[in-house]
Amino acid sequence: MGEEGPRFLHRKPDPAYLSLYLAIGLCLGSSISILFDNLAIGISIGVCLGVCLGAVMDEREKKARAAVEHPEEADGEKNGREKKQ
């Protein structure tokens, strides 16, 4: 590895947090539904929370990947100011 950096990066598979958190939310929702004796509301709350958390985690992972793969785009304003000076 020289001054230019690594020649290539090994790429991990795309994240699948949405399905993972959906399953976790479904489990938590079913436990909530047993606690409150209302199956429909508990499961729907759990699924909503799971989808929200999964979507947020997927987006964070995609932004982190974009910053590693294309650092010039992630820090565009800083580079733009340095070029003008």
Image (spheres, grey):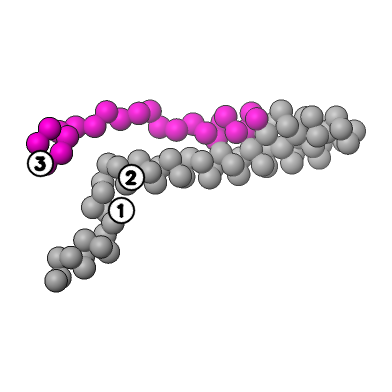
Q: Amino acid at mark 1?
A: Ala
Disc on the earlier residue, 2 or 3: 3
Q: CA distance from mark 3 to mark 1?
A: 21 Å
Q: Which residue is label 2 attached to?
A: 66
**Residue contact between numbered discs 1 and 2, judged by CB atoms under 8 Å:** yes
Is residue 23 one of those drawn in magenta? yes
Q: Position of residue 82 (x, y in %)?
A: 18, 65
Which quadrant of the rendered structure holds the N terminus? top left
Q: Secondary structure at mark 1?
A: helix
Which range of residues does the magenta coloring cover?
Answer: 1-24
User: Quick check: 54 left or right of 24?
Assistant: left
Q: Which mark is residue 2?
A: none
User: Quick check: 12 left or right of 38?
Assistant: left
Q: Position of residue 4 (x, y in %)?
A: 11, 41
Which quadrant of the rendered structure holds the C terminus? bottom left
Q: Amino acid at mark 2?
A: Ala
Is residue 31 one of those drawn in magenta? no
The residue furthest right is 37
Q: Which residue is label 1 attached to?
A: 74
The residue furthest bottom is 85
Q: Which residue is label 3 attached to?
A: 3
Mark 3 closeness class: few <14, some 14–19, many ≥20 residues within 10 Å: few
x 64%, y 38%: residue: 50
